[in-house]
Amino acid sequence: MRYALFLGCTIPARSRHYEMSALEVAKALSIELIYLENFSCCGFPLKSYSAEIAGSVAGRNLSIAEKERLNIVTLCSACNSMLNEERMRILHEKGYLEAINQRLGKLNQKIERPPEVIHFAKLLARGELLESLKQRVKRYLGGLPIAIHYGCHYLKPSSAFEDPEDPEDPSSLHTILTSIGARPLIYKGQKDCCGGAVLAFDEETASELAKAKLLNVKEAGAKAMVVICPFCSVMYDDGQKSIEKKYELQLGIPVLFLPQLIGLALGLDPKSLGLNLNTVKTKQLLEELLGS
Amino acid sequence: MGSDLRLGTLCYGCGVCTSSCPIARTNPIFDPRQILRKIIVGKEDLYLENTIWLCSMCYNCQERCPQGVPVADLIFSLRNLSCRSGSVPQAINLQLDSIRASGKTYPLDEFDMKKREKAGLPRLKEKVTDVAMLLEENL
């Protein structure tokens, strides 16, 4: 199983622990992730500026993977929705393939049939990989209570995906967590957005959203929160300390990327999963899990 | 993405968009139903209103609209109109500059590369420059 790994911009600069743990989990499950050096920004940040230009930038990335005959795996949810949306447009909008190829022609690039694009979490929830994951669990998590945060662009807009998950009742991350022995909690506001997308325009609202979520997670009794997008991690992990300070709260909720928790269940070394790089310390959680 | 604003006229005002909106709940200045109302009555300078930049792009409104109005995509269209008229928010300009120069919103410097190396991660190309050509199109 081989895929082009689409990192986007935020992960290689700010969420190296996400990248590290994804690589480790992929290796353990014999998924080959290939770096293509010419991938750029996915195009998502340009959507507000110009839908056409955002589409061109996404199309350029699709053409790079197509040339290597590789389908794409994303780790960032914004990249996931942008590249899938562009793919659907190419496949289904009349005249769009010609239009995009005209623009990509300036770069001597071309799309014939866009590659498939799948989020790493979604890939792991597929039948055969899920089975293989279950068989490789070495460290049972003993019903560890976890607050899952699906976030927005893993699921929405559902029109971006060929095989969308119901955004009102998503289940793929629950399935994965249950398979590795964790216990996904049902908590108030679990479908709410992290607020990351308005951080640059209205910091106050963004931190209100993140605070509300973290309080709900705390109240539900979660030992950790699991996220699958670097922006959600910026809001909940990197931003947690300033939220505690601003609202005079004590939260102390570890925020893990999904592959970090999976890696623990697979018995991998916490350091190789970058668990020392999370902003909210994971030490206590690790002690409980590893009994050291 | 980037939908025709006329689709807004399908709205019959039920307000599911606003009641599903995490931003409206926190900051009532932002009200998607009101934005749709203004689209319907043809408010000409709607795209210049600051509130269109408060959407978090979570797509709840779009998923739930019983009339199939692509609410979030219409807000993207309004933002595109704003940029086309020359009113580009600073946050967007910074990202444009970065993508133009390096192909990425977070360019990687030598410091980042060292941290990547330490984490056992492969070195990445610092700049992908041909992307800039795609940004030169007329809006």
Image: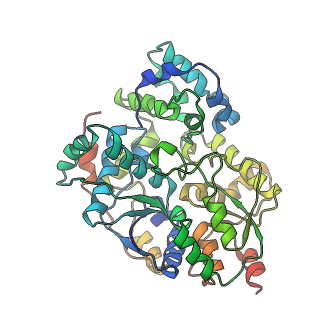
Q: Nearer the viewer, residue A8 or A189?
A: A189
Location of the N terminus of chain B (image quadrant): top left
Question: For residue B57, which quarter of the picture?
Answer: top right
Is residue B4 shown above or below A211? Answer: above
On-image quarter of the C terminus of chain B: top left
> Residue at horizontal 70%, vertical 44%?
A208
**Quarter location, residue A138:** bottom right
Across the whole image, how many numbered discs are drawn on residues? 0
| Residue B100 in view of the camera | no
Position in image of residue A7 (x %, y %): 43, 63
Whether residue A241 sits left or right of residue B51 in the image: it is right
Residue B75 placement (x, y as % from top left): 49, 31
Question: In the displayed structure, does residue A42 sit left or right of residue B36?
Answer: left
Most foreground residue, B65 or A76: B65
Query: Residue drawn at (30%, 46%), measured in percent from left and top?
Result: A56
The reply to whether residue A268 is visible in this rendering is yes
Q: Which percent across, then down, holds residue B49?
A: 51, 24
What residue is at 58 percent from the left and 27 percent from the top? Answer: B32
Residue at horizontal 43 percent and vertical 38 percent from the top: A48
A5, above or below B74, in the image: below
Query: Which is more toward the observer, A241 or A7?
Result: A7
